[in-house]
Image (spheres, rainbow, N blue to C red):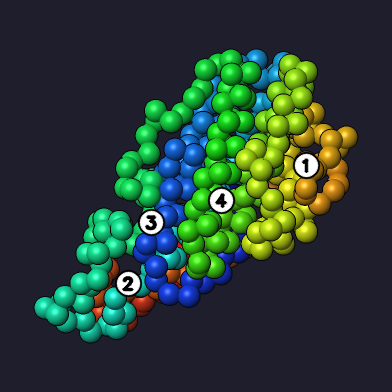
Amino acid sequence: MFMKLDRLQAELPQPKKPDPNAAAALQELLGGKYGEMSTLGNYMFQSFNFRNKSKLRPFYSLVSSIFAEELGHVELVSTGIAMLNNGPGDDTEEVDVSKAPFHDMQDIRLAGSFLSNGGGATPVNSNAQSWNVDMVTTTGNIIIDLLHNFHLECGARLHKLRVYETLKDPTGREVCGYLLVRGSVHAHAYALALKKLTGVEIEKMLPTPNIVLDKIPECQKYLQEGSHRRLYRFSPDDYKEAAGVWSNDEVALPGDPPGNLEVVDGLPEGGKVPELDGNYGAFAPNYAPEEIFEIASKLYKKGR
C-alpha cells in the first residue's frame, strides 16, 4: 500500500515566465523512452512480480524502495511541466474570446498540452507520443531485470543532461539537477546489486555516461547534503534489508563528494507543492471566481 504526502521531493523555483516549449522538452523526462514513467513502470511491476522475496529480500527491498521514489519523480516532473505551462495569454478575468486571446498557443510545440490538457502534464514524450507498456521489462529473472534497470538508469541520466542543456528557465533546470543526482544513486544501486549477485564489479563502469555533476550548478546543494550517498526506503519500518546491497562499507562514486553509503529511514525533506493560478479565460470561462472560492472555502471548512 502507499501513503501520499502533500509535498514534492525537491523544492522547485517559480518559472520566470510561461514557457510551454520548455515544458514540452521536460515532457521527455516524463513520457520518453528513458523517462520517469518508464523507470516507475519497470520497478513497480518488477516489485509486484518479484519471485522468492524471502530468499532475495535485500534485492526485493532495493527495487521496492526505488519504485516508491519513482512515484515522486513522476510527480516532480509533472509539476515542473505544469508550472512552465501555467498562465498562457491574458490572465485577467474579463477575456474577450472574439479577439483570439490565445492566438500564440497555436504555434507552441505541443499545442495539445494547452488545447486538450489545460497546460497540464500527461504521459507523453516531447513529441506528444504516448508512453506505453511496451517500455516495461519484468522477466522474473532477477539478473536480467537488474541489468535492464542499470541500462535504463544510465540512459535516463543522458536523457536528463540533454534536456537540461536545452533549458534556461530555473524550474526545468532544477528538476533536471535533482534527477541527475538521484538517477546516479539508482544506477549505482543496481550496479552494486549485480555485484552482490554475480561478483562482476559493474559499478566500475560508472558514471555512465561520464557526466561531471560538479559542473552543474543545480546539482550542488544535493551533492553537499549527501543525497548522492542516500537510498531512501520511503517507509518507517519496511525494506530495511536494502542495506544488504546499499551497504555502509561501500562509498560514493569517484568524482562525487566522498563518503560512505547509507540507507535512510522514511523519505527526503522535499519542498512544498506550488499553487497553480487559475486562468479564467482559458480554463474556467463563464464562472464567477468569487463563487468558486466561496464553494471551495465551505468544502474546506466542512472537511476539517
Identify the residue at horizontal 58%, vertical 44% (top origin). 157
Q: Quadrant of the N terminus?
A: top right
Separation of residues labelled 3 and 4 (CA atoms)? 15 Å
Separation of residues labelled 3 and 2 (CA atoms)? 14 Å
Q: According to the image, label 2 marks what residue?
A: 88
Q: According to the image, label 1 marks what residue?
A: 253
- Looking at the rendered structure, the secondary structure element under dot 2 is loop
Separation of residues labelled 1 and 4 (CA atoms)? 18 Å
Separation of residues labelled 1 and 3 (CA atoms)? 32 Å
| Residue 251 in sight in this render | yes
Q: According to the image, label 3 marks what residue?
A: 24
Residue 26's x, y, as percent? 45, 54
Mark toward the viewer: 3 or 2: 3
Mark toward the viewer: 4 or 2: 4
Task: Give the number of the disc on residue 161.
Answer: 4
Q: What residue type is disc 3 on?
A: Ala
Identify the residue at horizontal 58%, vertical 31% (top origin). 151
Q: What residue type is disc 4 on?
A: Leu
Q: Earlier in the sequence, mark 3 or mark 2?
A: 3
